[in-house]
Image (spheres, rainbow, N blue to C red):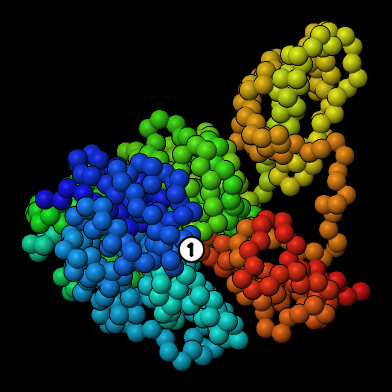
Amino acid sequence: MITSVLVANRGEIACRVFRTCHELGIRTVAVHSDADENALHARVADTAVRLPGAAPAGTYLRGDLIVKAALASGADAVHPGYGFLSENAGFARAVLDAGLVWIGPPPEAIEAMASKTRAKRLMGLNPLTDVTEADLPVLVKAAAGGGGRGMRVVRHLADLDAELAAARAEAESAFGDGEVFVEPYVENGRHVEVQILADTHGTVWPLGTRDCSLQRRHQKVVEEAPAPGLAEELQEEVSALAVRAARAVDYVGAGTVEFLVADGRAHFLEMNTRLQVEHPVTEAVFGLDLVAEQIRVAEGHPLGDTPPRARGHAVEARLYAEDPSRDWSPQTGRLHRLSVPEGIRLDTGYSDGDDIGVHYDPMIAKVVAHAPTRTEAVRKLASALQRAVIHGPVTNRDLLVRSLRHPEFTAARMDTGFYDRHLPHLTEPSPDPHAPLAAALADAHGRSRFGGWRNVPSQPQTKRYAMAGEEHEVHYRHTRMGLEADGVRVVHAEPNLVVLEVDGVRRRFEVATYGDDRIHVNNTALTALPRFPDPTTQHAPGSLLAPMPGTVVRVADGVTAGSTVKAGDPLLWLEAMKMQHKITAPVTGTLSELCVVTGQQVEPGALLAVVKETS
């Protein structure tokens, strides 16, 4: 019987495993890097063990340190979560060799399936070796791990070597394994997968299908169960293939077999020998706790003869700290508030006041809705996300709401090219035009409480705010009757709530201020601007500023100050949140300044380089 579980992971998945362990009466042990010393997963565990350092390579990817932590803390079992070492057969063996219970598949099954190259060979497929023009487009893919890291679509043969190098670097950083391979890239297929659960007694449950077609950078954004619109024969085919794959390697525990569906055919992609990020939608539909089932299987208990019956439909959206309108650039900062309406599942590794740092994945939370039908589940999730309170860095919340309400998605006609086709429309700014006025009136009310001058005539007051990348100026006046503003009727104003009547319609604006300048008005974020701009913050034309905090991992070969560059030429690469981001020349001209070197850490807005355009 398992009495104490160490989770060899962090963030949301560690918190999710701990929740089930606490419900089962199992003691919990967390490991944490120095960057995660005050992270939620370290706070909610019964015991926490420090892994010195911040980078994954020296902390969450150090299996030897994690095994020592398990033994020192008195844990008798290890759950790997997903990512990091979850599909590392060597780590699984080290856990077992230490006399601990491994809550996962046998190392031999991991070796057979966790490497995507070996998995394809097992299923009778082979990666591409000598790529030619006729093979394009192709997909460069990490052999270990997932989550979109180490993946690159190559459409031009001349780009292959550079993309292979970038994919290897990302895979090494994320999984401790830099092996990559190349396979044909199927355009605009549907990403469909089958959840399986197997015990040590020969029973394998196929737990329905999931659709994960909405992806950015090959990382899933919206997932649902069951996959809508699949022909019954195709559902039976992929379920049978998933069971066949599991039996071929004597699989034990939870796993997922993934397919790309195009033209009515299913193409095998890979088997993930771990719990998936999107497992909550399967749990909702089948009424199961997959983590609890993993633990029971690890204890040797048999599954029933048949899985439970599926009921209803579930949809999950991944809430990321990122800006989709700026090439999905990750964002950092303090998450001041996070809450969703009742009846919605929220899996997160953060609580109010936590900081989102640069070292790890930018996912803040998974938001899940379950309902009797797909239409109801999609509508429920879109509404919940729109009404959620998310105060902090820029997120993809608006993109998620628009995606869920897009006619292609509501009609279940989506595929993996969804964001390639629709991203500009889905990321068009749509800030509330009355948010700056509400912020100004809330601030004015707070200031006017401390004097009698509000009862005498005053000149119009002016305030400036930055909102959605643009400056907005608003005007209001203190009168004997209270606050007045042109064009609207001020019904009520106090520091946290403003009510305005616009064209006869009364609207409420909840206002929250953090620090001196960061303001959230309902779902709109604003920054209060000083009355007079600071001239020292101006940059020369052609300046390239860091879009995110990160580390300069590479400067393009031969690029130095004085080099001639063409628009679109890569200049350097930043690594942030386990992804590499290419910084390119904005115009054709001369690189007049190169302000960074390899290994240098930069903050958002830091000057990286200046390109002087050729006249």
- Residue 498: quarter of image: top right
Residue 24 seen in this snapshot: yes
- Residue 557: quarter of image: bottom right
126 vs 361: above or below: below
Q: Which quadrant holds the C terminus?
A: bottom right
Q: Position of residue 467 (x, y in %)?
A: 72, 41
Q: Position of residue 364 (x, y in %)?
A: 48, 48
57 vs 365: above or below: below
In this view, the residue in front, 184 or 585, is: 585
Total number of numbered discs in the rendering: 1
Q: Position of residue 19 (x, y in %)?
A: 29, 42
Q: Residue at x 81, y 31 (%)?
A: 463
Q: Which residue is mark 1?
A: 55
- Residue 120: quarter of image: bottom left
Q: Position of residue 493 (x, y in %)?
A: 69, 17
Q: Residue at x 71, y 20 (%)?
A: 446
567 vs 196: above or below: below
In this view, the residue in front, 562 or 260, is: 562
The residue tagged with tag 1: helix, strand or loop? Answer: loop
Tell me the amino acid under the disc marked 1: Ala
Q: Residue at x 67, y 18 (%)?
A: 494
Q: Residue furthest front?
A: 72
**Relative to 573, 346 lies left or right:** left
175 vs 132: above or below: above
Q: Residue at x 89, y 16 (%)?
A: 458
Q: Residues within 10 Å of mark 1 (few under 14, many from 20)?
A: some
Residue 502 seen in this snapshot: no
